[in-house]
Image (cartoon, rainbow, N blue to C red):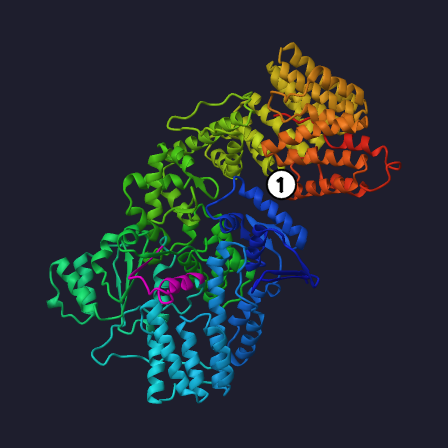
Amino acid sequence: MTDVNICLLGPLIVTRAGEPVEVPGRRPRTLLSLLALEAGTPVSADLLADRIWGEELPDNPRGSLHTYIGRLRRVLGKEVVRRAAGGYILDLPRSSVDALAFIDLLDAAEGPEAYDRLEEAIALWRAEPFDEPSGDSLAERTRPWLVDRYLAALEHRAELDIAAGRAAKAVADVRRVVGDHPLRESLWVVLLDALDAAGRTAEALESYEEVRARLADELGADPGAELRSTFTRLLTGSSPAPEVSQGQATVPAQRVSEEDMVPRQLPADIPSFSGREAELRLLDAVTISHDAGWPSVVAVHGIGAVGKTAFAVHWARARTEHFPDGQLFIDLRGFGPGEPLSHAQALTTLLIGLGVDAASVPAEVDAASALLRTTLAQRRMLLVLDNARDSTQVRPLLPGGDSLVLVTSRSQLRGLATREGARRLALDTLAPAESAAFLRQRLIDRTADEADIRALADRCGHLPLALAVAAERCSRYPDLPLTDLVAELDGETSRLAALEAPLDPISDLRAVFSWSYDSLDEESRRAFRLLGLRPGHEIGMPAMAALFAVDIAAARRLVDKLVDANLVREHRPGRFVLHDLIRDYALEMGSEKESGEALLRLVSWYTHSLVAASEADGRSFRLMSLDPVVDGVTPLSFATSPQARAWGDREWLTMGSAVRLAVRAGLLGPAYQLVNKMFSLSMRHPPAETIPLQELGLDAALRAGQHVDAAYIRNQFGISRARVGDLTRAISEFRGAAEVFREAGIAAGLEMALSNCGQALSMTGSLDEAVSVLEEAYAVADSAGMDDRARASLIGLAEVYVRMERYEDAVRLVEEEIGYASVDVDSSASPRMTLVDALIGLRRYAEAETHLRLELAHRLEERNRWGEANVLVRRAVVERETERVAQARATLHEVVAILDEVGELDRTALTRERVEELLASVGSSASADRDVDAEAAQGLGGGVALRP
């Protein structure tokens, strides 16, 4: 059991072991609130970044998020805040978060125990949540929903109090909140009923007049149907519908107009409809609950198979009381088999539904549209225009007046928003928890493991139609374990094959997607097919331009058409995603030739954009020859080093996916060249992400018969093995690469591999052998006239001198032969850091500190957090040895925070264990630990760096 509790229902309170703990900083508090609302469930890093920063993302949102996660871990414990697939998880039971416990109690408030559950839930409410600077997104997105659940719970409890003869209590409870929510009509209805039940009917009538006047003054509107009905009952003295005991269901009375039959054309609701609570609340918020009255048109848009029709019908059926004059429904057939309905066909169908004789419907579209508006002028109705093709198809069907039009479409219907002021609601896939609930409801007759249900929901991409098809298959074969279907979905070349419904086109995913694809022009179809190749989860506009072989402006126009058709989604500014099943469909539609050419362009774009990034970062070294830029590709250019680094970090995972795609497509040369150019970027990422790519690149180079290029990658692979502490394997790789370079007569490659080998040998303690190898590396560089490479070899030699405690030799080498300037080869080696280690060994702390200040300024300017940590840990050693204990501890805690943020990127340079050892030694007597300074200098990896 965890001892952490998080209270969100009011000002944020966090306790651990019963004691309050402080979470400093607005954004860390927002992050904690977001994770707490999904306690026990992973939350993607992209979603967290979107909720924390919105459109104002920092240059490195991933790094900033790591920083905040580190702060939360220090407050709550690493076991509570953990990494999860693609994001993070707050590993707490729902009962440890008051908002989740509140929701669970309300959801369980049924049957005989309903009143007790409501009491428990309401008792958790301290004040409106997120009413502090803890993030605008929480206040905008989550607070209204929680407040609505709280008010609904108060109303429900008051109704039960009235039924149990506790009307006076109900009056007092509702009076306490109605003043804060004076436009919530349902509260007033409960208050009037409570006053009437308490024998205070005159006061109830006065209260009705109070709310009627307020609605008229503030909204210019009359009370709604339910409030008017309650008023009428109070005037006539008629009794309300008989109360039922807890646990029974009520059947609402049906209203039929005295003048004529009221149209009730809504299709049947899906009995197993589940989820969409947030979207239903949002639709309520912009329609029936909107303070300024509802708009005339609301458009619900989303990809095919996302459940737009089911959502619209479910919402409409639950809110028929707001449309006393009826509801019309029409399928405009904008997407699907057959032609879309014409204006004349649609108008005729609607008018007949309103009682107009077919013979009286004008043939002219404008005249028929005018008749529709006239017929509806004095009515308050709901028109559901389902499956609209575009705004043009919808416009003649809009009635105006007090009626509401609810349109569903695969198109975003931007024209309706622009000209008619339509409010739009984007319907996305179901949340993971909603998908699991959907499957559980459909599979109620069979026992299924929760993990299998979640896995099946994930394979279906949380798309409602895919979930429904999968559930139907499971029901058809009750003896088929869910794990078999999950394995089938994993094993299919395309998951669409496993989710076929060929006998029912409207339930077949391929057919459903084809209707959107067929609506595109040919140029947009090609762009859609090529986007199926996109590596990784998302893709940016410049990469899409390379994929399409067009300029940025043309790419933007093409993508905009796909976004409008809801085939592509812009999930954050400039970054686009396809649903996995839609991506499968796009890949099926593409040809091998078209896909191969596009993938080659994309890999070429990434490779040469990395070259430009290296140049901007001051590290442009091209030992390996690269293929020229492919025709139709314009690589990026970068004005500054931070800009180049931010781009590289953002695209890191996507580039790795591009390598894997290229290898599978047989593009061996482009694949291993991209791996080679990713190396400098890889040094800012964990080796576990780098090593598999290098193995893939090495294999590709060998399969292509390019043994020299393979040696370059082998050298990089050796560096990655060293970074994880596997020095034996690293030395083997360096020696193997050196032999290839020696045989090929490539001096630069040979010097590089020998230098790396010498440094790795020194780390194993083979210091004499290391000196010999490094001296050979220096001789190779010197004889070839490669001055900078000769300097790099000498830096490695100086570092070995430090390890051998030949500190004076190391100082002499740096000051007299190497100098302080950075080495102009593809290396992050720092002569100044090697000098610092030697000065620490000589106890010349003042000089060491001077050089550390200069080095730290350089690392801060580079925004190199890992380099910053390496400088700071040396500063802590100096502070410890000069008896500045408090400063040393503070510096080491700063190093720990950086390691929490970026991880152990290189175990040859710095490890958490070493930092913890230094922390433990801070405060011990100087006399007892006088030799620790030398050990510190030898154990931190120096200023040397392995080179690719």
- View extreme (right): residue: 927
Q: Is residue 517 above or below residue 220?
A: above
- Residue 866 can be seen in this image: yes
Residue 386 shown left or right of residue 812 in the figure: left
Residue 702: percent from left, percent from top? 55, 26
Q: Nearer the viewer, residue 918 or 364?
A: 918
Q: Residue at x 60, y 15 (%)?
A: 746
Q: Is residue 928 above or below residue 104?
A: above
Q: Which residue is mark 1?
A: 902
Question: In the rendered image, which quarter contains the C terminus?
Answer: top right
Asked whether residue 284 is drawn in magenta, I would say yes
Q: Nearer the viewer, residue 779 or 794?
A: 794
Q: Secondary structure at mark 1?
A: helix
Disc 1 crowd, CA 10 A, few/some/many (<14, 14-19, 20+): some
Q: Is residue 684 above or below residue 421?
A: above
Residue 557: percent from left, percent from top? 32, 39
Q: Of the residues shown, which amino acid type is indicated by label 1?
A: Val
Residue 432: percent from left, percent from top? 50, 57
Total labels: the figure holds 1
In the rendered image, which quarter is residue 824 located in? top right
Q: Nearer the viewer, residue 830 or 881?
A: 881
Residue 298: percent from left, percent from top? 32, 59
Magenta stretch bounds: 278-301
Residue 452 shown left or right of residue 878 in the figure: left
Residue 438 shown left or right of residue 809 in the figure: left
Question: In the rendered image, which quarter contains the N terminus?
Answer: bottom right
In the rendered image, which quarter is residue 339 located in? bottom left
- Residue 242 can be seen in this image: no
Asked whether residue 774 is drawn in magenta, I would say no
